[in-house]
Image (cartoon, helix red, strand yellow):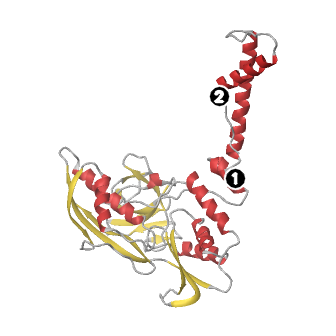
Amino acid sequence: MQLSLQNFSTLVERMAASVQGAAQNLLDLTVGSVLRAILEANASVGLWLQWLIVQCLATTRLATSSGADCDSFGADFGFTRLPAVAASGQVMFTRFTPSITAFIPVGTVVSTAANTQSFLVMGDVNNQAYSAASGGYTMAAGVAGLSVAVVASVAGSSGNVQPGSVSLLGSAISGVDTVVNANALTGGVDAESDVAFRARFGNFLAGLSRATNVAIGSAIAGIQQGLSYSISENVNPAGTVQMGFFVVTVDDGSGNPSPGLLATVQQVVEAIRPVGTGFAVQAPVVMLANVALTIVTGPGASHVAAVAAVAAAIEGYIAGLPIGSVLSYTRLAQLAYDASGAVTNLSGLLLNGGAVDLVPPLFGVVRAGTVAVA
């Protein structure tokens, strides 16, 4: 039912017409009169009550709710907003004189040049220099530099920084002089927006008590933000036909999702899969996209800044491609022009050495290899 809202003037006019219609004599409703003041006071109260009604209606429907009201609405169904994801990557600790052993403890703080974003060193069991027992990384004597894993101290997209942005040590480390990130720190995602929350809630309801693609997809999407997935039916991981079997391919944007993430996907799919079926959860087959192009910038423009903007735009676009999506060759040119207004022309655009679209294989995803912009 549509609520008919009225403004202050309309309320006063209708009350005046009603009062005058019930009176036998002409009433004084001029500005400043007692009766006019009473009607205007009642109109003000009416506006306030109308506002309360509107607020009540807005917060009792998910479609018109926002912020905490969205969260409270979803909480009644056991549905929660996906939190922000912290950016991560690798930074390189270096020194001028590698004559002694140095130790970099987990939790060491590094930050950008302007000190606007900070990152924490975290443990990495795949790094030979890391020791869980000692709680950090050891730079042996004679080693001039060591690459370690870091994560943004504040989750969100603000932690995504370009190569070379990290350059400050939060505190002095004996035997270490400098720090820098050779590659961009990526993966940071802001907390789920109200729009995305509402859209996912619809899929959540549609998938309840149903062992369908929508239900399985909704369960996977509820794990964390930034996931891309595909569900292939009646086929096994080898790509051959197997009735009653399906393959779930998952990626977090890196092309190499962690075993922990794959195990979590395995659990949520197991809880909702159709009875009598088998399935497998796997990482995608990564097809690297090597991009090369030369840009021309306008007079007075910073060519270096334009190169960085174009490279970041191309890398970001490729990182966001879903599983099975084709990387269009001509799309790369559009990205270059859109990345910076300083770009006036480009030449030598090559995608894996050619000028054709990149089509991933079965269970495949395209991810950035070398992006060379000159």
10 Å crowding of disc 2: few (<14), some (14-19), many (20+): few
Residue located 65% across and 58% down the image = 80
What is the quadrant of residue 19 in the picture?
top right
Per the rendering, the mark at residue 354 is: none
Q: Nearer the viewer, residue 198 or 284?
A: 198
State the count of labels: 2
> Looking at the picture, how far across and down is residue 35, in whole percent?
76, 13
Q: Nearer the viewer, residue 146 or 296?
A: 296
Locate residue 13 relative to residue 247 in the image: left or right: right
What is the quadrant of residue 142 in the picture?
bottom left
* Marks 1/2: CA–CA distance: 30 Å
Q: Is residue 215 visible?
A: yes
Q: Nearer the viewer, residue 263 or 368?
A: 368
Residue type at mark 1 is Phe
> Looking at the picture, how far across and down is residue 29, in whole percent?
71, 12
Q: Is residue 101 visible?
A: no
Q: Earlier in the sequence, mark 1 or mark 2?
A: 2
| Local secondary structure at mark 2 | loop
Residue type at mark 2 is Asn
Per the rendering, the mark at residue 7 is: 2
Locate residue 184 relative to residue 53 in the image: left or right: left
Q: Residue under circle 1? A: 73
**Mark 1 or 2, closer to the camera:** 2
What is the quadrant of residue 279 in the picture?
bottom right
Locate residue 372 relative to residue 223 in the image: left or right: left
Which quadrant holds the N terminus?
Answer: top right
Residue located 63% across and 60% down the image = 201
- In the displayed structure, 153 sits above or below 366; it is above
Residue located 76% across and 10% down the image = 26
Q: Nearer the viewer, residue 91 or 371?
A: 371
